Amino acid sequence: MGEGDRRSTDGTRERQRVLLLCAGIIVLSAATDRVTLGYFAWRPLLVRLLWALFIVATALNLRGAGRARTRELMLALAVFSTAFYAALAALTGGVTSPLFHWMLALPVAIAVVIQDHPTAIVGSGLAMLAGGLGILTAADTSPALCWQWAGTAAIMVLLAAYISGSYGRLHAREAALRLAGAEADTRARASEAGIVARDEFLAIAAHELRTPLTSLLLQIDAVERAVSLSPGGVLGEVERQRISSIARQAGRLSGLIDGMLDMSRLTAGRLELNFDRVDLAALAREVAQRFAPDAAAASCVMKIDLPEPLVGLWDEARLDQIATNLIANAVKYGAGGRIEVEGRGTADVVQLIVRDHGIGISAEDQQRIFRRFERASGQRQHPGLGLGLWITSELCKAQGGKISVASAVGAGAAFTITLPRRSPAALESQKLRMPAAEPPHA
Ligand code: ADP
């Protein structure tokens, strides 16, 4: 920690400011001595000047002082300040001086000014007892009154010590909180750095995996086509099934890698949308039909209710991705039940609802599943990265829309996406694509 940092955190600068203020007050209140005495006297002024000088010297010495040195300086300051005050009281009338009665409040005042130094308070208390009793004795005060004054003084010192101890505990608690805050900051920074490193790694890995996978998919496609063109060829049924299983797994892998690529694009704000006139009803019907074989394999009956065209300005490929994610999830988590794909629209917005009757999602999990890498608890039997809904939600947002879910455990789930037919982003992109208006001919 640098010198400047240390001073600002241990409060030395603030302490110095308070001490200089006290020195100023001590000198300026010299005028009151004239009122007390009824005439001007040099000696009280001299005491005040010496006291103020002593305080200024202490404040300067505090700079760069360690804990032990600060403690010594505070003790000296408290003892000498009390002594200077007692001298002032003695010089301005002794027992009859108004300053003498305020002497009892001195340790409390010192506890407030220098804070968190109980030893200094004890030192000041002893100095006060000595000074006060000296003044009282010089004025031939009766021993009973002396004892009474000493008792009051002792109570005041105890009070001051309590105040000082309270400040000590308060400062210790503040320091502990500061430390905990600093540790939390360090942890947050480390975890942020970890997240950035993870995102970078995923982006690079997805990018590097995409190229060989693309050529692998092309090869698998060619093999599948060759096999389907020669139904009675050399390959038996088992081999054919293996090839289609390879194709399915490669397709799944491709989907996962696309998800990772989308994630890195979305995180980096590099998602580009191509807005065009799209019929969401036709698109959703097509996606649902694409899933017919998977739905059949999962014993799901798909019911499509998309009666009218739902036209708007959207990115067709991204809309396809949204419908694909929702229907794929419905097949995955709603196996064995009915799946309903519904659409409806008003003049301004359209809605697509994908409902299944599968395992459902608890209220608590519903809060999390739209976040990155979040999955509902107890999902081990269904593989997944927990990215699909986050990407879907981001794609909806990018087109001015939103996604919501209604579900309960064991009662299936209904995901609804709501999209404006013309989002501000879509209108802006259309405007940019329009050719500049021709100037009217003369
Ligand atoms: P993934 O399916 O790859 O885990 P998603 O982001 O698509 O990732 O989904 C996040 C989580 O939301 C899933 O892990 C699952 O727990 C839950 N979920 C999504 N769709 C459904 C659904 N139709 N029924 C039940 N749970 C679902």
Image: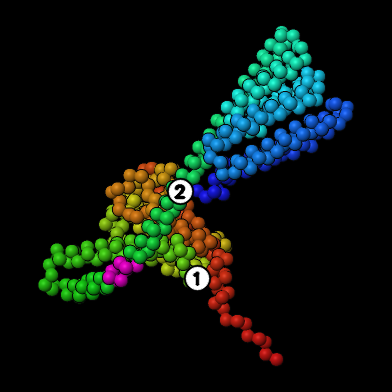
67 w.r.t. 156: above or below: below
Q: Tell me if I can see residue 303 in this picture.
A: no
User: Which element type, helix, strand or loop, lies under badge 1?
Assistant: strand
* Ligand 1 within 8 Å, label 2 CB: no
The residue that appears at 19% across and 66% down in the rendered structure is 243
Left or right: 309 as drawn, with respect to 234: right
The residue that appears at 54% across and 45% down in the rendered structure is 6
Crowd rating for badge 2 (residues with CA inside 10 Å; few <14, some 14–19, many 20+) = few
**Which one is in front, 143 or 1?**
143
The answer to which of marks 1 and 2 sits earlier in the sequence is 2
Residue type, mark 1 in image: Phe
The residue that appears at 72% across and 27% down in the rendered structure is 85
Q: Which residue is mark 2?
A: 186
Q: Which residue is mark 1?
A: 275
**Which one is in front, 422 or 262?**
262
Left or right: 376 as drawn, with respect to 218: right
The residue that appears at 39% across and 62% down in the rendered structure is 200
Question: Toward which corner of the image does residue 318 lie, by quadrant?
Answer: bottom left
The residue most toward the right is 38
Q: Quadrant of the C terminus?
A: bottom right
Q: Tell me if I can see residue 121 in this picture.
A: yes
Start-end of magenta stretch: 207-214
Residue 182: x and y in percent read 49, 45
415 w.r.t. 157: above or below: below
**Which one is in front, 43 or 124?**
43
User: Which element type, helix, strand or loop, lies under badge 2?
Assistant: helix
Question: Toward which corner of the image does residue 389 lie, by quadrant?
Answer: bottom left
Query: Magenta segment: does it hold 161?
Result: no
What colour scheme does the image use? Answer: rainbow
Residue type, mark 2 in image: Thr
